[in-house]
């Protein structure tokens, strides 16, 4: 259940669980919806936007973004040989 302050705000005016997106000029969700960005791409973008703004898990956020990019390669481009790890 939302607290009293959140019930008076629009959903795009608050964040549940932290404030790591609050200083961005446009919210990540608003950007993704406005640009019709898919779920996999959106999650990669979300973690890339968030990694430098959270206290813990910065490296893990980058790894999560890479993982979503690898899923895109596998499912949308049928790249399954781990080519994204090649230099």
Image: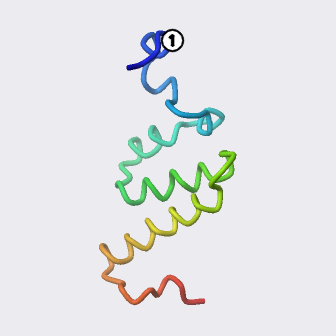
The one nearer the camera, 12 or 59, is 59
The one nearer the camera, 36 or 81, is 81
Question: Against 78, is 71 above or below?
Answer: above
> Dividing the image into 4 quarters, which one contains the N terminus?
top left
- Please tell me which residue is depicted at 44% across the width and 86% down the height of the picture: 82
In the figure, residue 63 lies in which quadrant? bottom right
- Please tell me which residue is depicted at 38% across the width and 71% down the height of the picture: 71
- Please tell me which residue is depicted at 45% across the width and 37% down the height of the picture: 30
> Dividing the image into 4 quarters, which one contains the C terminus?
bottom right
- Residue 49: x and y in percent read 59, 50
Residue that badge 1 annotates = 5
Question: Against 3, is 30 above or below?
Answer: below
Residue 73 lies left or right of residue 9; in this view the side is: left
Question: Against 13, is 31 above or below?
Answer: below
The one nearer the camera, 53 or 60, is 60
Q: Quick one: SS at disc 1?
A: helix
Is the residue marked by circle 1 packed among few (<14), some (14-19), or many (20+) residues within 10 Å? Answer: few
């Amino acid at each position: 259940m939302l607290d009293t302050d959140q019930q008076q705000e629009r959903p795009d005016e608050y964040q549940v669980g932290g404030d790591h997106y609050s200083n961005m000029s446009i919210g990540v969700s608003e950007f993704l919806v406005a640009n019709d960005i898919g779920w996999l791409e959106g999650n990669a973008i979300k973690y890339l936007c968030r990694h430098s703004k959270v206290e813990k898990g910065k490296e893990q956020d980058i790894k999560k973004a890479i993982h979503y990019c690898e899923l895109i390669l596998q499912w949308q481009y049928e790249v399954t040989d781990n080519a994204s790890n090649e230099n």
